[in-house]
Image (cartoon, rainbow, N blue to C red):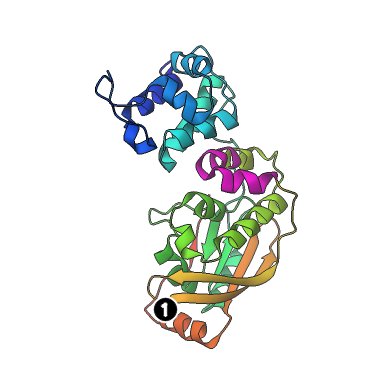
Amino acid sequence: MDDNALGEFLRARREALPPDRVGLPAGPRRRTPGLRRAELATLSGVSVDYLTRLEQGRDRNPSGQVLVALADALRLSVGDRVQLRNLSKAASGVGALCPQQPPEREVRPTMVSLLERLEPAPAVLFNRVGETLAHTAAYARLAGPVGLLDEDGEPVNRWWFVFADDRARQVYPDWDGVADERIAELRAESALDDPFLAHLVEELEIVGGAPFTDRLAAAPAVPRRTGLERLVHPEAGELRLSYESLDAGGQRLVVYLPADEGTAAALDRLTMRGPVPLRAVSG
């Protein structure tokens, strides 16, 4: 990797951000179409001197708060925020960007059989850090069109979707309540010093910003094992779903049931659209 990849990334994003995108006049005397260092410093609350040292590679260990402030000020996309965090970790010499021992992804045969027997109910299995491991065909019909299933075959993290996917606020009309519940799950399912979870949390601090960090800093809450979620589906409209969340020995099984007759009819229509195989992801 370039010896000053972090600094070059910050400078490139600063110089690529038009002043009018952040409410500043363009002016006729600019040598670059982007922001000046002093302007980015003002927008982010980071001193000009410190920003200069970061860009020049003389400081390689910015705090998470500094990264969040710079990412917000630079209007970084989700992908750019992840790249910023990874470049920062590499520059500081923290170590490998990915944990060497990820959480269990293997689905037990008995769990596969249970999911098959749960059809046609939407049901999904998660591991301790919120990754989707397996699900019923009915869950695919429910969750796929809203973005909760990844088309390229990788497990989808339910916490990442809520805080880092722009679609989540349209999918969940009660987004604030869902976000509160996901944070409660995150804290209850795995210790924050779990290296894999720590990596995810560090990324979500940058990508999710204050809606994530404020909740994580609040007093821990006990996650609910049963409740109701409203979900807006592009084909079925708004659905009211009761859920049961069951401990499955280091994994968690969540089963959704219709909370009213309209939702029951909509789920029936979704699950009658043809066969979708039960999905299991193995590591």
Left or right relative to 219: residue 169: left
Q: Name the residue under label 1.
A: 270
- Residue 143: percent from the left, percent from the top? 46, 66
Left or right relative to 91: residue 254: right
- Residue 217: percent from the left, percent from the top? 69, 44
User: Residue at the spot x=42%, y=54% of the render?
Assistant: 153
- Residue 213: percent from the left, percent from the top? 62, 43
In this orientation, which residue lies closer to the viewer: 237 or 2?
A: 237
Main SS, magenta region, reads: helix
Residues in magenta, as a range: 201-217
In this orientation, which residue lies closer to the viewer: 108 or 139?
A: 139
User: Residue at the spot x=43%, y=60% of the render?
Assistant: 147
Q: What residue type is labelled 1?
A: Leu
- Does dot 1 land on a helix, a strand or a loop? helix
Residue 20 occupies quadrant: top left
In this orientation, which residue lies closer to the viewer: 5 or 175?
A: 175
- Residue 57: percent from the left, percent from the top? 47, 14
Q: In this view, does 109 lie above or below 184?
A: below
Whether residue 214 is in magenta: the answer is: yes
In this orientation, which residue lies closer to the viewer: 252 or 242?
A: 242
Q: How crowded is mark 1: few (under 14 residues within 10 Å), some or many (20 or more)?
A: some
Residue 4 visible at all: yes
User: Residue at the spot x=70%, y=67% of the render?
Assistant: 225
